[in-house]
Amino acid sequence: MEQKQLESLLLTVQKPGRYSGGEINSVIKDKTKVDVRFAFCFPDIYEIGMSHLGMKILYSQFNARDDIWCERVFAPWTDFEQVMRENDIPLFALESRDPVCDFDIVGFTLQYELSYTNLLNMLDLAKIPLKAKDRKALSPLVVAGGPCTCNCEPLADFVDLFFLGEGEEVDLELIDLYKIHKAKGSTKQEFLKEAAQIKGVYVPSLYDFEYNTDGTIKSITPKENAPAVIEKRIIKDMDKVFYPESFVVPYIEIVHDRAVQEIYRGCIRGCRFCQAGFIYRPVREKSADTINNQAKALCESTGYDEISLSSLSTSDYREIEPLLNKMLDWTQERNISLSLPSLRIDNFPEELLEKIQYVRKSGLTFAPEAGTQRLRDVINKNVTEEEILSTCRMAFKGGYTNVKLYFMLGLPTETDEDLKGIADLAQRVVNEFYRLEDRPKGKSVNVSVSVSTFVPKPFTPFQFEPQITRDEIRRRQEYLKSCITTKKVTLSYHDSPTSFLEGVFARGDRRLGQVILSAFKKGCRLDGWSECFEIEKWLEAFSECGVDTAFYANRAREYNEIFPWEHFDYGVTKDFFKRQNELAKKAITTPNCRISCAACGANCYKEGVCYEKR
C-alpha cells in the first residue's frame, strides 16, 4: 500500500499518532546496510508500550549497533485493526512502515498474562503463522522475554524461543548467533539447537512434558542436548550496563509521559506475594553519580519537564538523599519535576518528604497491602500500623491532603476481619488528619483505597496457594464496600473476571495453548481493557477445550508437585519458597536482606546485596 493511501486511512481512526511514527529520537536506518532487522513488539497499544522502560533500553541498545535495525510495533486499537483487515494492510513497524513479516526476528515483551491473545492477533495481522511448528524457515524468528517468561508454557506452541531474565547481554548474543546461521543458510532447527546452549535461552520445542492421571506434571525431559535447567541472566554491574541517552518522544500523550531513570534492580523486602521481588534478585544498585548523569542527559535529549526514579522500592536505595541533593541542583534550576514512585512506609524520613516538596506537590501513595497486622505478617510486609499512621501524619503536616493506599483482597488466610481492617485503617488515616492542629486549613482530606485481587504467581512463597473463586472475590468486594461509611474514603477495585483469567494463566502449562488459540479465534484480544474483555468467550474456549479452570487457579499445590516452570532457575530455590510458605501460615516475618540473609539462593550470582557486609 502506498504511504499516501495509508495516511488517508489513518485519518479515519482515533489517535492516528499511534501508528504514524516519525517521533523525535526515533531511529531510521538504510535497511540494505544492516544484517539483522528486529521488530520489537509490545502486545498492547502504543500508549502502554511507549511507557515501558525495558523497550526503551533495548530499542536504543540494539540501534547503537550498525548491523542491527530495531523498530517498534504495537497492537492496534479495534478501530485501526478493522481498517487493516478491510484494506489488507499487514501489521507494520513504525519506523519504516515495512510489514513485520519481512523482519528477521519478531520479539515480544510479555508483561501481563492478559496480553497473550494480543500476541496471536499481532502475528495474525502480520500474516505470520501462529504456531511455531508451522513456521519452517529461519525467519521470521518469533522470540519473547519479560517477566511472564518465568512461566511461559501457555505460549510454548507459538514462540520459537524465550529469554529468561534480563535482556541486555543475552539478546545480543542471540542476534550474533542468528547472523552466523543466516549467513550459512542454516535451517531453523539447526539454529534453535545451538541457541538453546546460550545461558538464559529456552527453546520449548526441545522439551517434552508428561502428565500424571490427575493432570499434574509427571516429568519434563530435554532432548537434542538441550540443558535440563535453564538459568536466568542478570546484569552484574549496573554502572556499566547500557542505558539510553535519549528516548523516543511521542507526539501523543502516553501513560507515563516523562523521562524515567532506573536506579537499581531487585528488592530486599521479600513480600511473599510479589513475583518481581524474587525474580529480579539480587539487588544491584547504580551509583548516585551514574544516575544523576544519565538523568540529566535524558532530560536534555527529550525536553521532558518531569523525571521519575524507577525501582521496586525507591526509598530503599541507599544513596537516596545524596542522589536527590545532586538532582535538585539542576532540576530546580530547570523547573523539572522529580517523582519518586514505590516508596516504603517504614523508611520514609521527613527529610525525604521535604526534598520531594521542592519539586512536586501531589498525593502520596503507599502500599500497606493488608488491613490487619496479622495479615501483614503473613505476607511479610514488615510494616506496622503506627508506621503507616505516622507517615501519613508527616505527609499531612507537610501540606498533603490526598493519600492513596494500595491493598490486596484474597490473600492466603484472609478473613472478613482482615477486610474490615482495610476500612478501619483508612478511617484512622482520616482521623489523623483532623487531629492535627497544624493541618492545611480550609482543606479536607481524601484517602483513596485501591484494592486488587491476589493472584498466586510462580517463583513466590504463595505459588502453592489457591486463588479464591470468582464468586468469593465478588462477595469480599461487596463486604469491604459495606464497611466504608465515610465520603472521606473512596474505594476502587479491579474486575474479578480479569483476575480470574490471570490466575489461570499465571501457573498454567502448555495445555492452555489450545485455549488461547480458541479464544483468539472467537475474537478475544485487548483483554486487559474492560471495553474489549469478554469473559463469556473465554469460558466457552475453556469448555470446548475440556480445560478445568479450577485445576489451575483454585487448587492448592503440594510442595513436591512438579510445576510447569520447574526447569527454570531464577536463583531463588524452591526449598526457600517452601520455608517461607510455612512461616506465612504461622504469621512469622522474615527480616529484609540488608538485616540478615534468609538463604534464598540468590547468592549464586555472587553480586549485589548478597555479598555486602551487613
Image (spheres, helix red, strand yellow):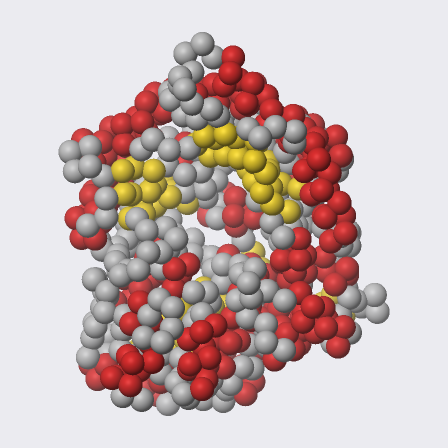
Give residue 351's quadrant in the image. top left
Q: Could you say where residue 284 lies in the image, as x and y percent from the top left?
A: 40, 42
Camera-nearest residue between 572 and 544: 544
Camera-nearest residue between 330 and 448: 448
47 on left or right of 230: left
- Residue at point 50%, 72% (across, down): 119
Work out whether 25 lies above or below 469.
Answer: below
Q: Can residue 209 be seen?
A: no
Work out whether 48 lies above or below 450.
Answer: below
Q: Can residue 478 be seen?
A: yes
Q: Could you say where residue 485 lies in the image, as x and y percent from the top left?
A: 65, 29
- Residue at point 45%, 70% (across, down): 77
Give residue 554's quadrant in the image. bottom right
Work out whether 556 lies above or below 364.
Answer: below
Q: Could you say where residue 151 lies in the image, as x and y percent from the top left?
A: 59, 61
Determine the residue located farthest toward the right in the rendered image.
213
Camera-nearest residue between 259 and 322: 259
Give residue 1's quadrant in the image. bottom left
Camera-nearest residue between 458 and 94: 94
- Residue at point 46%, 34% (across, down): 365
- Residue at point 69%, 32% (across, down): 483
Q: Could you say where residue 65 lies in the image, as x and y percent from the top left?
A: 23, 68
405 on left or right of 20: right
